[in-house]
Structures are given as structure tokens and as C-alpha cells.
Image (cartoon, grey):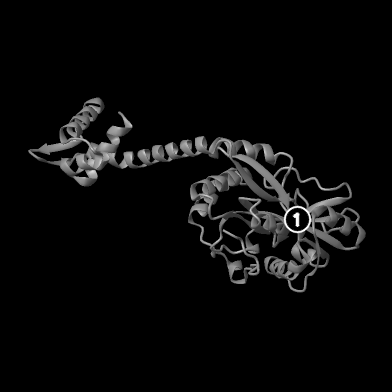
Amino acid sequence: MQIQQLRYFITLVEKHSFTEAASECFITQSALSQQIKALEKELEVTLLNRNGRTFTISPAGRLLYERSLSLVKEIDDLSKQVQRVYHNLGSTLRLGLLSSMDNKELPEKLKEQVLNRTGYDLSILYGSHDELYELFGTGCLNAFISYENRLNATESFSKTRLFATKVYAEIPKSIEIPSYSYSKLKIDVEELSKFKLILVCEEEHLLEEQQYLATLFNQNNLNCQTTTNIQDGRKLILQQPNSALIVDRSLLRGDLSTHNKLFRYEVISQGKAIKRPLSCFARKNFSQEELMELCTIIMELGQKKASLEQAKDDLISYQDSSDKLNDKELSYHKHHIPL
């Protein structure tokens, strides 16, 4: 059974005419008829119930048609992907990741997957959201991953939701935190709101980040301070009493080590983890197929297997405004990404 024979059969079923199907397939009617008969002979079934110059589709033919549709599409998609990988070889995809993401195990795994499935050599740059944004705006990055609330899609770049990462707070070991009956260190938002919170962002965006965090935590009057990177933030919380550094979880859910004088606590509310959605921001000249493949790879590395299929469905169906935080979503309208 050849793939081309299946294409002929699909076309014949949809056109329900040997004349129209042959014209669509750029072959003669006799050649088309011979191909269908050869397919029937190989399968040892009757696909068409012929009656003179007319025909009806047999139950076996209907089954073959319905199953062949997805099979042929999968083969066509595979063919296109193979061609993209081949043509992309030697080209570089520049991707920006937040500094708080795993920079030990992640690069090699991500680079291997991107090369094998897109053909691109992956170059990873780490930085804060604002540093990545500036690199993106000047054309130094093709895409970057950051928090969903930071930007809205524009005519210049697209925004694709990935998945939500847990929010963590790093706190000096010298500070006593009420214990919970959990195997991992956790802190409730009400307890955390008593601390001065150190946020990794530029000073000019502190108010917006503070407002978003207040919405995320459902806590008013948070006391927040900015730092430009995690390393400086860790120094600050060791110097300032009752302060905590807010960080996201590693993309690979791997190494959670921080500092020998700090503990990392999972932030919870009513016993459940608080999560912050991540999105992939990409330039519009980055093809949709390659963007979807990149996002799928990232989700496979960042998601647990049980939730991966749902995450893929979310990736396909995602529209820019879909959850309860979007009515308070913050975007930096002064920014402009050149085409």
C-alpha cells in the first residue's frame, strides 16, 4: 500500500468522480482506475461498489478513507518538518531565558532537541525580563521566555502561552518559619506578606510587578523592593531582616539549590501551590510551525508527563486573553519591537 495510492483514493472519495479526481491528481482516468484496483487487490477487499460509470464507497472503503486522512496528514507534516530541519542546518536560533531558570542541565538537553527537531543551532542568553526584552527589541534574540503578564502581543511580535511555574521565596535560614506537615519547605502567602519582598525587575517596573504579585497572592499592601538579578537579591535578604526573594521554578524542575545560608520555600495559598504562567514571545518573522515546535520542546522539558498532553492542547487553543488575571494584565505600552 503506497502513500500515493492513498492520496488518489482520498481524492476520489471526496470528488466522487473518476474524471474530477484524475484531473485533480494530474493523471489519466485509466491510470487512476488501475491504482484503485491495485489497492483493492493488495488489501484483498472491495473499496468501491461499481455500477456502470457510477460507484458507491463500501464500508471497508469508508474506513480506509477516514483513517487515511490523518495518516496522510501526518506524513505530509513529517515531510515538511524534515525539509525544514534540512534547510535550517547551519542557522542559529537565539533564545532568551530568565536568569532564574536552570542553566546547568537545561542548555544541552534543549539544544539537542532543538537541533534534532528544527535543525537550528540553539544559542541561549540569560537575563532578567527587561534585559531579555532589550535584546529582543534590538534583534539579538529571535524569541524569549518570560512571565505572561509582562507583555501583550503586538503587530511586531507574538505571544504563546507555555505553562505555569511554581512561585518560590528564598529566605535566610536564620528566620524561623511556621512548619507544615509537608515533605517540602512551604510558606503560606499570609505569612510571606509579613516580609519585605525582593523582586527581580527594573526600578521603573516595580509598581506594576508589585500590583501583579498582590493580585497573584490575593494580598494587599505588599512591601516590595527591586533588584536587578538573583545574586544581588540574595545578598539583600541576608543583609535586611525579615526579607524574602521571589523566584520562579527551574524550567527543568531540577536543581533547586540556592545558597548555603538560604532556604527555598514553595509559596502556597490554602494548601495549594501558587503558579505564574510563562509565555514565549517571538518575532513575527519566526514561522508559526517552528514556533510551535520550539514551544512543544520547552513544554516537554518543563512539564510533568501527566499534564503534558493538556499543556499541548492549551498551546494549540491558547488565545491572548483567557484567565482571570487578564483583566488586570500589565503591559509596557512604551516598548516597541521593530519588525
Does 71 sit above or below residue 265?
A: above
Q: Is residue 290 above or below residue 129?
A: above
Looking at the image, residue 73 sits to the left or right of residue 19; the answer is: right
Residue 175 in sight = no
Q: Position of residue 288 (x, y in %)?
A: 50, 50
Per the image, the residue denoted by label 1 is: 247
Above/below status of 259 relative to 331: above
Which corner quadrant of the image does residue 267 belong to?
Answer: bottom right
Identified at 64% across, 67% down, the residue is 331
Q: Position of residue 146 (x, y in %)?
A: 66, 56
Q: Indicate the secondary structure of the residue bearing disc 1.
A: strand
Q: Quadrant of residue 301?
A: top right
Viewport quadrant of the C terminus = bottom right
Answer with left or right where residue 130 lies relative to residue 70: right
Where does residue 106 sit, x and y in percent of width and height?
69, 41
169, above or below 321, in the image: above
Disc 1 residue type (three-letter) = Val
Seen at 63% across and 69% down, the residue is: 333
Question: Which one is nearer the viewer's eye here, 122 or 255?
Answer: 122
Residue at the far bottom: name it.
221
Percent of width and height locating residue 211: 71, 70
Residue toward you, 141 or 253: 141
* Mark 1, other Cα within 10 Å: few <14 / some 14–19 / many ≥20: many
Camera sees residue 4:
yes
Quarter of the picture containing the N terminus is top left
Q: How many marks?
A: 1
